[in-house]
Amino acid sequence: MSSAQANSKRPSWSTIIIILIWPIFSLQGCDKLSRTSTAYGRVTEIGGSGVDSIDVVFVAYKNISGQKGLLRITTDKDGNYSGTVDVPKGYGNLDVAIPSGGNPKFTRVYRDYDVYLNGKKINYCCPAEIGGKTQYDFKMYK
């Protein structure tokens, strides 16, 4: 028997089990972290001035059957907003929007808005990236 074979030691069963199970335990918190989502932006009038006191909502959707309101925030004096939510497991979509209901300044003063995703005008509204950071700017029409 060579000296290399004599000195090598086979790993014990406990070592093998630890090597196989450790990745499962180390990834337990990753799913929750990956569902933390941020959306931010600015609500302005067509001329560019910020619009204060406009509500922005974050809503999670589960297939066709369910939705869950996660956050309702109001723009500051310069029209800025920012929010971070943890999207619950089982919900596959997150939308950020200006609701018409329960948003008195919007319904009294404005009739519609254009939407900009990360600085580019889009014709749909407003899915945010789950586990990421999304910028939505809204330009209001009177």
Image: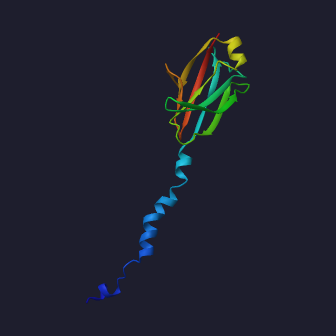
Which residue sits at x=53%, y=45%? 34
- What is the x, y in percent for residue 54? 69, 22
The colour style of the image is rainbow
Which residue sits at x=53%, y=51%? 30
Q: Which one is nearer the viewer's eye here, 73 or 114?
A: 73
Q: Is residue 45 above or below residue 55?
A: above
Quadrant of res 101: top right
Which residue sits at x=60%, y=21%? 138
Quadrant of res 12: bottom left
Would you say residue 118 is visible in this rendering? no
Q: Is residue 140 above or below residue 20?
A: above
Q: How many marks?
A: 0
Quadrant of res 66: top right
- What is the x, y in percent for residue 103? 70, 20
Q: Is residue 77 above or below residue 30?
A: above
Would you say residue 42 is visible in this rendering? yes
Residue farthest toward the front in the current orientation of the protein: 65
Q: The C terminus is located in which quarter?
A: top right
Q: Is residue 116 above or below residue 3?
A: above
Q: The N terminus is located in which quarter?
A: bottom left
- What is the x, y in percent for residue 45? 64, 16
